[in-house]
Image (tube, rainbow, N blue to C red):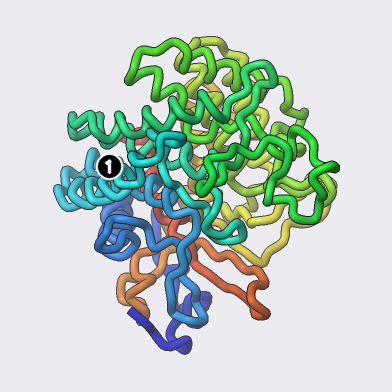
Amino acid sequence: MKWISRTACTALTAAALLPTQQVSAQLKKEEIITAINETAGYVSNVLLDEEGKSRCDYNLTEGKWYPYEVPWHTGQAVYALLEAYKVTGNQAYLDAAKNGGNYWIGLEIKDDPKMKGMVKAIHGDVLGPDFVVFATVSDGTPGIYELSRVTKDPKYAQVATNAARWMMANMYDRDKGVCYDNLNIKTGEVLKEYSPFWKEKAMKDQELYDVSRPNTEGSLFKDAYEVSGDTAFRNAFINLCNSLLNLQGPDGVWMRFMPNSEAEHSFHPRFPLWYAESLIECYKLTHDKKYLEGAARTARTFAKAQKKDGTIWYDNYLNGRPSDKGSATGSAAALAGIVWIALSENGYKEFDKNIEKSAQWLMLNRYAQNHPDPNLRGAVLETRTRSKEGKIWLTNRDIGTSFAVRFFADYLHLKYK
């Protein structure tokens, strides 16, 4: 549906949000459950379309939705809905999660012998329609595996595991401790010498870490191991997590890998947190505390980046440069909170104040239920400002809400076990 820009532009005004809403110093159980229902209701009723796929980025000035790495956005929406379902028992959330999961497994490639078992998880956006990115697949899979656990239907996990097997066979380099980032979906070629992410770099100038990363986002190989029992997946996951530890700097944010930038000294608001989350999963698998400490190094840098009111901005820097305040990243406040909660439950109580800041921020920075634009009612603030097609491209992104649902569910468990 299309809405006039006059109403969409109200998205950033004080009246459009809930800054005056009164919340308790520590959120009450009823407040948290209400927040879960309002945000999960938005995910199920607005974010997922009739096919079950995420609408992704809502352009605030145009009043239109634009796709962006749809498979991982959809997988995260499914994950959020399942967490909401487990808390509330609301069947509508499970039904919407199934719809999203059915869309995701419908991406399985069955008719191309070279790529059979892989999923057609197009990145889109700057890479266009020709490329699949490893993390576009892997970071959507936690919700797909969880859907099989909750429904007891193995078909979702089976498709994800088939993709994991293809990716391990074709994109994983055991000796180098990485997975290559890009697959040309038209030719079946894994790009090992050139990445389209670096259009300004000629092929001869690109190095291993320009075309590959440890790529543990979503802990895909761990889930594949737990479903299949195939120890090759377990060994690959541990190997990649060891690579993470070996490549991690003292700041804990892996500056060599995009979308972090060594040149700008900037780190992405979620990317290092996904790696930290995978290290926590590796601790669960191995019980080796070195993985927890690796995750804690990342978590400490994000604790420094979080502002007094709980905000985490999109662009943050290690060289003392102030954060760029052009984009308020609700997904970062939520995902950092998820990581902080997991660490707190394992004895790292140093992050407890940061958890509370995230809880307060996410509770307050939600679009009102009576917002004039129904595309925003119940969403969490997740603005992203960039220049595109000759104009300012101002969006509210779906992932702020998806990660917030997960945070609220984890926070509820932490405080009201």
Most foreground residue, 312 or 80:
80
- Residue 336: tell me if it is visible: no
Where is residue 240? Give x, y as percent: 60, 22
- Residue 1: tell me if it is visible: yes
Relative height, residue 242 to residue 79 (above, below) = above
Relative height, residue 72 to residue 161 (above, below) = below
What amino acid is labelled 1 in the image?
A: Leu
The residue shown at (71%, 45%) is 260
Most foreground residue, 339 or 190:
190
Name the residue tied to disc 1.
82
Where is residue 368? Give x, y as percent: 36, 71
> Which part of the image, by quadrant, shows the C terminus?
top left
The residue shown at (34%, 17%) is 228
The residue shown at (43%, 85%) is 7
> Which part of the image, by quadrant, shows the N terminus?
bottom left
Q: Is residue 86 left or right of residue 390?
A: left
The residue shown at (47%, 13%) is 232
Where is residue 24? Give x, y as percent: 39, 53
| Kind of element beneath mark 1 | helix
Q: Is residue 39 left or right of residue 277?
A: left
Relative height, residue 341 to residue 174 (above, below) = below
Q: Is residue 32 left or right of residue 313?
A: left
Relative height, residue 255 to residue 164 (above, below) = below
Query: Which image quadrant is residue 301 in?
Result: top right
Most foreground residue, 298 or 221:
221
